[in-house]
């Protein structure tokens, strides 16, 4: 690629501005120089019937579970949905079965899949921070959330000390941030949430994922009691009382799932809800309240233990089918800028804006017209055709175009 290159496409979707028909985007080195209307700049490369979008953001996944597809198979209940605590048992057994070498291979597998599907920023929940080394060498940005667990005072203290030691060994780099993830209210002592409340990097936690979780927190009853006793970690004194207490304690929190939060749940401006649509569907949860919630919403795939792939665009397309009331322009924002803002990279990536990183996705479009150009992205099943990260093609469009 030359020092200064202008690309033209049928549609440019800046995200922070209206779509541009037959627009251009100009890149110098690793930076977007200009996004312009048709005729403003002479293109060097005409990409044809495609859309140019910002690089996608997968705000929640678990790359170390990329070998765990077998966890899904035997767990269907009478409705054909996965049963959560049975699924958790399978995930725990899978984790215990993997050697460190196998874990790194799983992370590499999931990472390659994310990149192929156009993801250029990843929020990864990582047991022991195991994905840090691979992600910091990858063609993407990442926040690596070291998972923290423990209901008992002793176990919580051990986990927190281990996470802090890991963070000290892995200082932030350009495009890569170490952070923490208290796993969930059913597995994390309430004092740990309080300890994390003043942390500067975003904190990610699973929250209100199942009805059984609410039953456990509010009444100390339900299937989680037997599950935690089976693991010999049952400690009701360590439980937080309500999901709202978690939300109050994490002012920049990233709350994953939120399937059973009330639509009127109050959130702070810097907080984010991450929904994982196809995982939500796999467990047979009722319709998600996010369309009626007043909170920034981003998209995640969750892991291959509950999802067929790590295609974050497929999550947005699934939502377009299941939640037609959500404007397609908002879906694109959930796929890009909202996740970038949640992970602390909103000033760097997530939109096609002059001065931001040249992180682009080239998406072939159907041979159709639409009064709503965003729908051309979501009604099609066409796969990503090109991915640029920091001005470098990591998945190149067809050779004849370049």
Image (tube, helix red, strand yellow):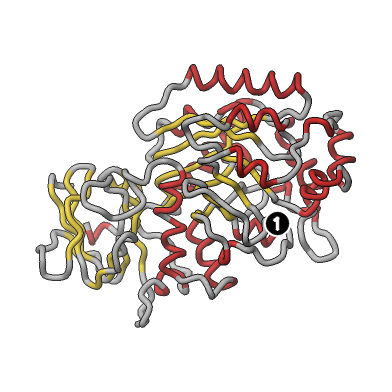
In the shown orientation, is residue 61 left or right of residue 140?
A: right
Residue 93 at least partly seen = no
**Label 1 element class:** loop
Q: Which residue is mark 1?
A: 260
Q: Nearer the viewer, residue 5 or 222?
A: 222
User: Up-down: is 49 above or below 126?
Assistant: below
Estimate the x, y position of residue 104 in percent, counting from the top left.
56, 31
132 displayed left or right of 49: right
Looking at the picture, how far across and down is residue 60, in whole percent? 55, 46
**x, y (%) of residue 363?**
36, 63
Name which residue lies at 55% across and 44% down.
254
Residue at position x 41%, y 47% in the image? 340
**Image height of 43 relative to 257, above or below:** below
Who's the residue at 77% across and 60% down the image?
81
Report crowding for label 1: few under 14, some 14 to 19, many 20 or more residues within 10 A (C-alpha): many
Work out which quarter of the rendered image holds the C terminus and state it. bottom left
Report the front residue among 36 and 344. 344
Q: Total number of numbered labels?
A: 1
* Horizontal arrangement in the rendering, residue 348 relative to residue 292 (left or right): left
State the residue at coordinates (21%, 51%): 354
Residue 310 in view: yes
């Amino acid at each position: 690629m030359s020092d200064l290159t202008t690309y033209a496409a049928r549609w440019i979707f800046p995200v922070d501005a209206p779509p541009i028909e037959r627009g251009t985007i100009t890149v110098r080195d690793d930076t977007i120089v200009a996004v312009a209307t048709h005729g403003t700049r002479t293109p060097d490369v005409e990409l044809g019937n495609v859309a140019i979008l910002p690089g996608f953001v997968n705000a929640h996944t678990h790359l170390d579970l990329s070998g765990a597809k077998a966890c899904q198979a035997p767990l269907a209940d009478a409705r054909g949905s996965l049963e959560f605590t049975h699924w958790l048992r399978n995930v725990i057994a899978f984790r215990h079965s993997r050697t460190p070498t196998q874990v790194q291979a799983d992370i590499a597998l999931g990472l390659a899949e994310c990149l192929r599907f156009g993801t250029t920023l990843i929020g990864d929940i990582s047991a022991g921070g195991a994905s840090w080394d691979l992600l910091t060498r990858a063609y993407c940005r990442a926040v690596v959330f070291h998972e923290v667990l423990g209901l008992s005072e002793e176990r919580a203290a051990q986990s927190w000390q281990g996470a802090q030691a890991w963070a000290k060994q892995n200082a932030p780099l350009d495009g890569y941030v170490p952070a923490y993830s208290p796993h969930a209210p059913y597995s994390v002592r309430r004092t740990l949430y309080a300890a994390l409340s003043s942390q500067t990097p975003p904190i990610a936690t699973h929250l209100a994922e199942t009805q059984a979780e609410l039953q456990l927190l509010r009444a100390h009853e339900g299937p989680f009691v037997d599950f935690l006793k089976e693991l010999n970690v049952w400690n009701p004194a360590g439980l937080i009382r309500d999901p709202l207490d978690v939300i109050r304690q994490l002012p920049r929190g990233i709350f994953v799932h939120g399937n059973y939060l009330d639509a009127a749940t109050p959130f702070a401006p810097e907080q984010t809800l991450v929904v994982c649509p196809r995982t939500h569907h796999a467990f047979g949860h009722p319709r998600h309240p996010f369309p009626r919630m007043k909170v920034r919403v981003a998209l995640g795939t969750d892991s291959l233990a509950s999802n067929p792939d790590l295609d974050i665009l497929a999550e947005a397309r699934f939502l377009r089918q299941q939640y037609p009331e959500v404007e397609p322009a908002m879906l694109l924002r959930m796929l890009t800028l909202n996740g970038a803002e949640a992970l602390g990279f909103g000033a760097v990536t997530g939109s096609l804006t002059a001065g931001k990183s040249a992180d682009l996705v080239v998406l072939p479009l159907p041979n159709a017209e639409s009064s709503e150009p965003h729908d051309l992205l979501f009604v099609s099943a066409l796969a990503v055709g090109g991915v640029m990260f920091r001005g470098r093609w990591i998945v190149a469009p067809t050779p004849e175009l370049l």
